[in-house]
Amino acid sequence: MRRRGDKFPDNGFEAWGGYMQAKIAKLEDQFSTKAEKESKLSNIFNGVSIFVNGFTKPSADELKELMPQHGGVYHTYQRSNDFIIASNLPDTKVKNMSTAKVVRPEWITDSIAAKQLLDYRQYLLYKNSRTQPQLKFNKIKKDHVKCDTQNGGMHEDAILYAKEMNHIINEYTFKETSKELDMCNVPTSNPKLPVVENKSKKSDSVAKTAVDPNFISEFYNNSRLHHISQLGAFLKQHVNDLRENNDFTFPARAVLKKNIQALNNVQQIEANFDSGKIIMHIDMDCFFVSVGIRNRPDLLGKPVAVTHSKGKQGRPKREGVDRYTEFNLYKQKQAHKLGKATGIPVKDIEIKSRVDLIADEDDDEYGSMSEIASCSYEARAKGITNGMFMGAALRLCPNLQAIPYDFDGYKEVAYTLYEYNTIAQYTLDVEAVSCDEMYVDCTELLNDLKVSVQDLATVLRQEIKTKTGCPCSTGFGGNRLQSRLATKRAKPDGQFFLTSELVEDFMFNIHLKDLPGVGRQMAQKLESLGHQTCGSLQTLTLGLLQRHLGNKTGAQLFNQCRGRDSNPLTFHTVRKSVSAEVNYGIRFENNAQCYEFLKQLSVEVHSRMQQLKVLGKCITLRLMVRDEKAPIETAKFMGHGFCNVINKSSSLPNSTNDIEIITKEVISLCKKQKIDPKEMRGVGIQVTRLEPLNAKLTKGGISKFFNKNVTQHTFNSKIISEDENGAIFDINQFKFEDGGEPKLPITPKKENKLLSPIKKSPKFGLLKSSPGKKRGILDINQIKFKDGRESKLLITPIKGNKLLSPIKKSPKFSLLKPSPGKKRGRPPNNAKSSLTTSKNFMDKFLYGQNQVNEQIQYKKENKDQILCNDEKNTNEELSQQGLSGLPWEKVRELLRAWLDSGQSPKFCDTKMIAGYLSKLVLNKDIDKVYILVNYLKRRTDELNNSMWTEVYDYVLEEVQSSMVVVYGKKLWIND
DNA sequence: ATCCTCCCCTAC
DNA sequence: TAAGGTAGGGGAGGAT
């Protein structure tokens, strides 16, 4: 089982990966290969890897020799965990990298001379307190790390640092491995030595088929598609989190504006803003390749492909492979599908396929069936495309350079692209598409900066390039479709603004295949109708398209081919399903093996569900089974070959995330199919109809928070440290602006505010201060505020005494009844039952909605904690206390789950949230109030549902009334 | 009409 | 050798 997230809970990015075992395996590999090849002089650099940047003394070549001799690893191109060895670096480079790991080469030579690893910090090329490593040393237990005598007098922190940087998580394994290598400086392949026992066991465990216990982890660790998918999902969540935890002030905009103004050709603002929005689409150019050659200038300008295959290398022969038959089956199926869709006789259809260029099985040179994940533009010029087989690609371009995957590198670059240090420091109106692609609604940003689209693009692209080392392209347009097509035009390494005047001409020549949503099937269908371009398709009527393609798809295409797209960017995503599947390496001999694998896959799904904190109600098993006409041996090694797909699902009586239930259900579904396990070629498990769970807010968990200490801590301390990022809330940091014209150095947003009239609810009019009005004074001694950030808190003066009067409960407030208006999503179970059940959403969270499931779960996971059941805390008491005893992160989490629940809001929940926020106000925790209220506002805006809007209005009224009581002023709200 | 289920398709 | 995952949208057709 892969374990995720438990080791590095403080670092979201690491938590995502968590492939501990694989990492360790990789590490062991590094050691063993070295040990096999070199006769080592020492183990000084065990666990240390370096990358040499620029001219050094000793030279890169000499270091390359030295490192393995002393137990270290030398990388020809940079990996994320490397120490960077450099004697000097140009300033521009330094600006754009973390200098925490840049070390002078003397570190290496001195360490060797001293026969021990010296503290690298004495050799840092740049000593900048701001960029010093911020290690959470307490995360690693000291007693695990004592690296005994083998490391000589190595500074303990240095050991820790080296280890952390190299992601050596399992100290035990690390030690064992090192010791083994220490014991014998001999090739580990010698079968006589004890170590070899170990080694040979290990090589046995190189997972070949799904029967191997390590197969899932091994496979996922090498699967590009898995990485792409997980990274994408992670980044979407990341954007959710950013928006949730951010106050939406963007101090970095000032710098951005300066940088833009520093461009030579400062233009005045174009008429960008005449018609609605400006959407930007950012896409890294051939992402995997760009990351892979960041430190391989020798490959720049050459045809390069990222692939598992090493090139024209001989492959072992496999009996029974019949590529011709297998490929033909695919083609026939495709032809059949097309014939059915278009009415063209199947025999008249000729299918082109990516297998066309691939050679016979026994052709060593052009026969590789390794897929190309990404290829450079030079390779594309030769006709190579992503997804093509290596054999075919080599035929098109015999000097194609194959480079390996660098999944850590992709992760690192993606993170750079999405973290505060690039786009997110300027705006959070970001929709994450994938690890290398995003949409940004630039309307507000451009308005604020008053710069041209082109200048903004130039500076942003440059910034991304310097920070990631990879080129990207950006496209701009009035909607997401236009911006996307613009990017396509801009590539590679360019930018393009598709202005509204250009759209019509531009669209005319766009190939239908280039429209998002038009894939192979649709493109072929449309081609069979006689259309290949948007211009051509524009001649068809809406009705005709809908008849051929269905209502939605038809309408979508009708609009798309005219450049129209009314789909807004989605800044917040809610998960609807969780799944795991493996369609590679599946070769079972008997049912037992099959069920064992299903069990492992269930564990995988379960752990993903836990991470996402969801329960699910519907479980689907997906099987790929060899088609009877297909050869038993597949064309691709361990591939699935030509298969039939079986989907079977089962609805559970209750939502669950119980591993036992999932496993049982999946195996039972599988048994029912009565499929010969020998014929299985792929297995997948999917869980749908999700609902949120917060296991920590079960009864036992909650009573902890009613502990007196916690309460005191929350309410009385002036300096508290409960921010999950470790930030300290410190009143001394608080600044408040008083009187006169607002200077607004802190909140660029405010400028907009003052420029643009308020459109929304008329209530808001009262909250706004008009530009000339004086601001009130707030007693800063009573405000808690986050460390290190400037204030965005603004309090408007009270408008008359009216606002002090008690708040009337709006009579239209009708949350207990389902609105007859539009429905969103699937109501849980059925609408009636959800309304009549006694428990509301918050209660479910607080007291355990799926009490059975959860408590079982809870007991399993918290055997030690369950002792704290102070039964005096009855539900009733908790009800009275509401949320006020909870840490605010919990409330935020709860609020999020509530908004994501897909249910109709209930008044009691609304009241609870409002009550909590009011208490925060009384507690003068304005910072948190501000974040929560704005989060609520953004989310309810997005939900665009009158019931939720009422929730917001109600909560805001409550908050503002408390504000008036406490401060005599209202909280300033972003609009 | 409006749903649910079982697909297929698309995107990265 | 090779690592063909995963989430979401939507259509077809049957159930309500």
Image (tube, coloured by chain):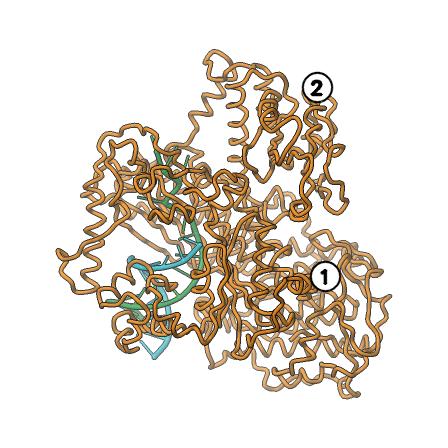
Chain colours: A orange, B cyan, C green
Amino acid type of the residue that numbered disc 1 sits on in the rendered structure: Gly
The relative height of residue A27 versus residue A520 in the rendered view (above or below) is above
Q: Position of residue A438 (x, y in %)?
A: 51, 60
Q: Residue at x 67, y 43 (%)?
A: A90
Q: Nearer the viewer, mark 2 or mark 1?
A: 2
- Image quadrant where residue A515 sits: bottom left
In the rendered structure, which disc, 2 or 1, sits on the residue that comes first in sequence?
2
- Closer to us: A637 or A308: A308
Is residue A891 at least partly visible in the picture? no
Q: In the image, A95: left or right of A573?
A: right
Q: In the image, A475: left or right of A55?
A: left
Q: Residues within 10 Å of mark 1 (few under 14, many from 20)?
A: many
Amino acid type of the residue that numbered disc 2 sits on in the rendered structure: Lys
Screen quadrant of the C terminus of chain A: bottom right
Is residue A645 at least partly visible in the picture? yes
Q: Residue at x 34, y 47 (%)?
A: A382
Structural distance between the alpha carbons of marks 2 and 1: 56 Å
Question: Both on one chain, marks 2 and 1?
Answer: yes
Residue designated by label 2 = A115
- What's the mark number on residue A553? none
Q: In the image, A404: left or right of A899?
A: left
- Closer to us: A206 or A709: A206
Q: Secondary structure at mark 1?
A: loop
Name the chain letter of the residue that bears numbered label 1: A
Residue designated by label 1 = A885
Name the chain letter of the residue that bears numbered label 2: A
Q: Position of residue A30 (x, y in %)?
A: 53, 27
Q: Position of residue A175 (x, y in %)?
A: 62, 25
